[in-house]
Image: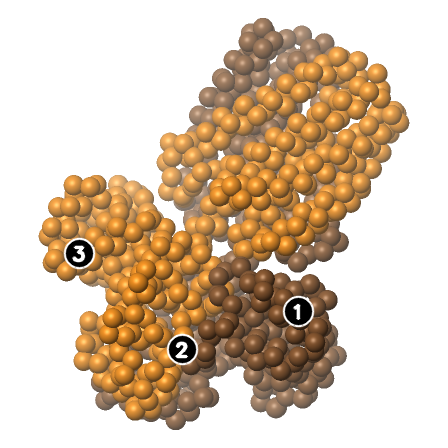
Chain colours: A orange, B brown
Amino acid sequence: MTDTSTLPPAEPGQIDPVFLEDLADAIDERDIRWLARTLGRMHPADAADALEALPYDTFEEAVELLGKDLPPDILIELRDSYREGAVEMLPDQAVAQALDELDSDDATTILEDLEDDRRERILEDLAPVDRAELQRSLAYEEETAGRLMQTEFVAVPEFWTVGQTIDHARDIGEDLPEVFYDIYVIDPAHRLLGIVPLANLLRQPRETPLEDIMAEPTMTLNTSSDQEDVAFQFQKYSLASAPVTDDAGRLVGMITVDDMVDVMQSEHSEDLLALSNVSSADASDTVFETVKARLPWLAINLFTAFIASAIISVFEGAIEQVVALAILMPVVAALGGNAGSQGLAVAVRAIASRQMDGDAARRAVLREFLAASFNGLLIGAGVGLIAMFWFGDTGLGLVIAVAMFGTFLWAGLSGILVPLGLKRLGADPAVASSVFVLTLTDVMAFFSFLGLATLVLL
Amino acid sequence: MTDTSTLPPAEPGQIDPVFLEDLADAIDERDIRWLARTLGRMHPADAADALEALPYDTFEEAVELLGKDLPPDILIELRDSYREGAVEMLPDQAVAQALDELDSDDATTILEDLEDDRRERILEDLAPVDRAELQRSLAYEEETAGRLMQTEFVAVPEFWTVGQTIDHARDIGEDLPEVFYDIYVIDPAHRLLGIVPLANLLRQPRETPLEDIMAEPTMTLNTSSDQEDVAFQFQKYSLASAPVTDDAGRLVGMITVDDMVDVMQSEHSEDLLALSNVSSADASDTVFETVKARLPWLAINLFTAFIASAIISVFEGAIEQVVALAILMPVVAALGGNAGSQGLAVAVRAIASRQMDGDAARRAVLREFLAASFNGLLIGAGVGLIAMFWFGDTGLGLVIAVAMFGTFLWAGLSGILVPLGLKRLGADPAVASSVFVLTLTDVMAFFSFLGLATLVLL
């Protein structure tokens, strides 16, 4: 056991400032031994957090100092931008050594960061077996099970017993993957026959044949399975790991739940950001990256905002005669926009959690229509009454109430139909939905309110 | 092994319509045997999906028909609203039997659904040991590790060897928890000393003492730990399960990653919905539930929208003289609102993933300020030029450009300061943030644009 009594406590997100100073001092004094020993004794995730909490220059110094003494486990726990920076600074030899020590899925992540020629050079340094394996992993599409899986797993023949399996594990000991939860049972052609969770292996007598206790795989992941589908199935079936097979049914890899948790987190973040018109975001983003992720959407919105203006300009005459219209216009647009965003968020979430298939979609459209009618009636009446009393004009109150109601219906329907339509077209329902929905709602709001006013009040 | 060849394929979210018809027919014909056998042979998650795909009446009929033959595993996989409905229909005896069969965390979920007096009645039916255990679980606060943990786990004394541990597991066999990934090592006072992952147990010789191979727990969860913190640590440390101790350091339970994945999903959904002003949502919501989750936010927005109107009404005279102001007003508000939402989404996400502590928050505020300045400059110039050419009025172009720039700065800062402030106040940064930010932005947009126009153009 490691003595961890002098290490900083593992509070999430909280790094002891005294420890951070010690770390910075050690880097300043180029005390490589202290650095390597201290970081090596921490949990890699904590060590990565501590390094990321340093000013970026100091972080780079630390990486340069440590070189090949930077534990690969820490490298892999760093956030994307830090890891990429670190890999760029490390000498080829250190990167090759890290690739050698890491599981294949983590090694692939590091290879993805490299420039093509550097990647070739470093791969040349590896043992031919390892090189071939990593090249095969890289050949799978990004965001597929093939790219995410590790090629280290434990597979044994069906005719083995529990005892033989345990003896085998003891024999190869250190060569087993560091983390695994299941033993896979295969036939001579390497086809997956069944799964034996370690907890089941443990409770069986030595002489029990594996084929008697193995379970049919709950799901069969193919190397080309989409990562979002894989994550969904991990959640649905409460799995800790799952085998991956190739098109011929041969077992080629294993995916563990921690990687799926990361996929879920990033898919969620993407949805949340996309709904607010941000392409990507990371806490370590520079101002330039922040602008790049937002400006294009603002530029699109600039265009759509002027569409709304153009609608208003059609009714210039009406506004000149009844200035109250200009005062009330934004109320219709703001409330309609809010109603549209509400429906949109619910729809995007339901689509992401696979609750919008077939009949469910039809039921949801009907429900949105009815909810929008009801909310539109109540909010329309409220807005109408306030406008009537404020401007002492019953006609104006009626006009805005009816326009509000119409805008709610329109917003409610576009809030669900736009994401469903994007999904049907094979696009991501979260991306661009909100620009569409808000533009449609604004146009409807101004057109119905000013149009009705022109008909009724002038 | 179960013969699953005749079962529907486990495609996520896709249920074979022919199978659904068979299911409905069997319910219609009250063929309890077929139902129990077929559902029992499916993965509980698939069986739950199939039942949820039936019309709700038919689902209720199925539950009534099956009674205590409804496998508890399926009950627990049903969505909240369906599970609550099913539990309500099942006879007390069937519920008691389900509680007996399920792990304690799942049993607690079912108990939470019950009315107080029925819960007492059913608990009376259980064996005193089970009753005491479930009552203890229910005594923990909701959304804490104590409430989420299961009290079934495997703990052995430190002086045992690998061989003794495996023999013990074989002896108690069926009494072991169905799923576990680690063996916990405890002292005579039941205090947690270390953890031995099954994969490590397996690779060690029989005679190795556990104390030589046990690892210090990566994190120590207390029964009162907040579920969001627990989920965060599961992700950070890539865990499949973790032990839970009471205030005296005694091991009292275990949490597995599948429950944490569910927590992450619901926390994410809450954030996404809260940012769009929806209190809660489920695909099976009725129209009434949908209205209830949205109308209160619309009512608040009704009030804030009229604040913006009041600002406009102050400048009534200006609008009467220059009607172009009314035409362009929504452009400033829409673009400012978009910039505010962008920053808000990024901030809420960063807070949720613990990337906004201490110095990171200050850096983020600075970054938002700079990004808003840059975007404000470009978009302001764009809007200004379009307005200038459209209305042939350089002054108007300048006024809207400056107003746009000011609104962007204001939107950018409120997008980050409002959620940070709510967090500091101990409130959920996602809830109510967007109403605040959009109202602040609208007010600023109208005030700066119309105010500047009055000063410069009239």
Q: Mark 3 points at which residue?
A: A132
* Percent coordinates x, y for residue B378 in the rendering: 46, 21
Task: Report whether A67 appears left or right of B118.
Answer: left
The residue type indicated by label 3 comes to Ala
Find disc 2 in the rendering and name its residue: A215
Please identify, in this view, whether the residue under mark 2 or under mark 1 is nearer the observer.
1
Secondary structure beneath dot 2 equals loop
When asked about the image quadrant of residue A169, the answer is: bottom left
Which residue is located at x 75 percent, y 79 percent? B117
Indicate which disc residue B24 carries.
1
Comparing marks 1 and 3, which lies closer to the viewer? Answer: 1
For disc 3, the neighbor class at 10 Å (few under 14, some 14 to 19, many from 20) is: few
- How many angstroms separate mark 1 from mark 3 (CA)? 52 Å
B104 versus B310 height, above or below:
below
Task: State the separation of the CA atoms marked 3 and 2.
Answer: 32 Å
Q: How crowded is mark 2: few (under 14 residues within 10 Å), some or many (20 or more)?
A: some
- On screen, residue B217 above or below B283: below
Q: Which amino acid does label 1 sit on?
A: Ala
Q: Disc 1: which chain?
A: B
